Image (cartoon, helix red, strand yellow):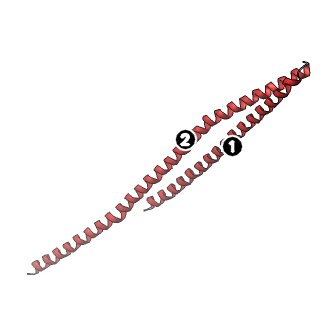
Amino acid sequence: MGFGSNLKYSHDALLKLQDWELRLLERVKKFMVMRVKSDKEYASTLQNLCNQVDKENTYHLDYISNVSKSWLLMVQQTEQLSKIMKTHSEDLNSGPLHRLTMMIKDKQQAKKSYVGVHQQIEAEMYKVTTTELEKLKSSYRQVMKEVNTAKEKYKEAVAK
């Protein structure tokens, strides 16, 4: 039964590979979730900062100079960055992160299915190699008894 034992090692190796892939995907998902959260917080912080600056600037912009123009441009650029970061985090959350979650579920389902099929095959193999083999051995013993009985009757008939 070398064939069956070789398959056992392959099965174990395949399960280890599936487990490793699932753990890696879970780590990637955790990283992406933290990245989305971080990007949202950063965008929110930048927006709050711009809102504070806007409130202060409405009172103090009596004189427009190159410095004040530069300052306003910097605030606008920061606000624009805030919007970009917010959009980026939403896109990351709804796109790749969602697909990654679905891939993890699919891989978990595939592993579960594989394990179920493997268990069915193992049960069938056990049934064939143990239960049916024992039935055949028992049947063989019964037939051998009948053959021996028939031989003895034949020898007795020839001896008479």
Pointer 1 with pointer 2, Cβ within 8 A: no
Expressed as whole percent of the image width and height from the top left, the position of residue 65 reads: 91, 19
Q: Residue furthest top?
A: 64
Q: Where is residue 141 shown, x and y percent of the image?
A: 26, 72
Give how far across and how far down residue 18 sits, in percent: 55, 50
Indicate the secondary structure of the residue bearing disc 1.
helix
Could one spot residue 71 in this view of the protein? Answer: no
- Within the image, what quadrant is residue 138 found in? bottom left
Position of 9 compared to 95: left or right? Answer: left
Residue 24 appears in the rendering: yes
Which of the image's four quarters has the C terminus? bottom left
Amino acid type assigned to the residue bearing label 2 in the image = Met
Which tag, 1 or 2, sits closer to the chain's start? 1
Mark whose residue sits in front, 1 or 2? 1
Which residue sits furthest left? 160
Picture residue at 79% right of the left edge, 30% below the top: 51
For label 1, the crowd category at 10 Å Cα-Cα, with few meaning under 14, some 14 to 19 and many 20 or more, is: few
Q: Is residue 97 left or right of residue 11?
A: right
- At label 1, the amino acid type is Met
Looking at the picture, does residue 63 appear above or below residue 79? above
The residue closer to the viewer here, 57 or 17, is: 57
Q: Residues within 10 Å of mark 2 (few under 14, many from 20)?
A: few
**CA separation, marks 1 and 2?**
18 Å
The answer to whether 61 is drawn above or below residue 102 in the figure is: above
Quarter of the image for residue 134 reads bottom left
Closest to the observer, 50 or 102: 50
Please indicate whether residue 15 sits to the left or right of residue 30 in the image: left
Image spot of residue 12 (x, y percent): 52, 57
Q: Residue at (36%, 65%) from the top-left corner?
A: 130
Name which residue lies at 51% across and 58% down. 9
Q: Which residue lies under the disc numbered 2? A: 102
* Residue tagged 1: 34
